[in-house]
Amino acid sequence: MTRPTDPAIARQARMAAIVIAASGILAIIAPMLVTGLGLAPRYEILFYLFSLAGFIWSLVVTYKIWQKTRK
């Protein structure tokens, strides 16, 4: 793996990785959260939408990183 020369690009990549991991974990534990807290099923869908938003945001950020590092 090549080292990014710009620390800002590395910071963006780390942030995207953290958001991807958090979104995946949220999508996995959403049913357990809803049943454990006794919430209505619509909150599970809300958690899934938050997770989807995180994945989409990460996709956009990684695309921008790729465009910056392309030569």
Image (spheres, rainbow, N blue to C red):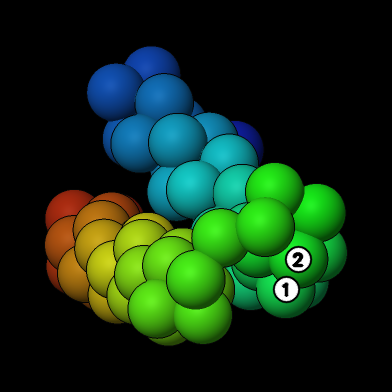
Tell me the residue at 35%/36% (across/down).
Answer: 12
Tell me the residue at 58%/41% (across/down).
Answer: 18
Mark 1 or 2, which is nearer the eye?
Answer: 2
Q: Quadrant of the C terminus?
A: bottom left
The answer to the question of whether label 1 and label 2 lie on touching residues, with beta carbons closer than 8 A, is: yes
Tell me the residue at 18%/62% (across/down).
Answer: 64
The spot of residue 44 in percent (x, y) is 52, 73
Mark 1: few/some/many CA within 10 Å (<14, 14-19, 20+): some
Cα distance between the residues tagged 1 and 2: 6 Å
Tag 1, which secondary structure? helix
What is the number of callouts on the image?
2
Number of the label disc, if any, that sits on residue 31: 1
The spot of residue 14 in percent (x, y) is 53, 36
User: What residue type is disc 1 on?
Assistant: Pro
Q: Nearer the viewer, residue 12 or 36?
A: 36
Is residue 70 in view from this perspective? no
Tell me the residue at 80%/54% (across/down).
Answer: 36
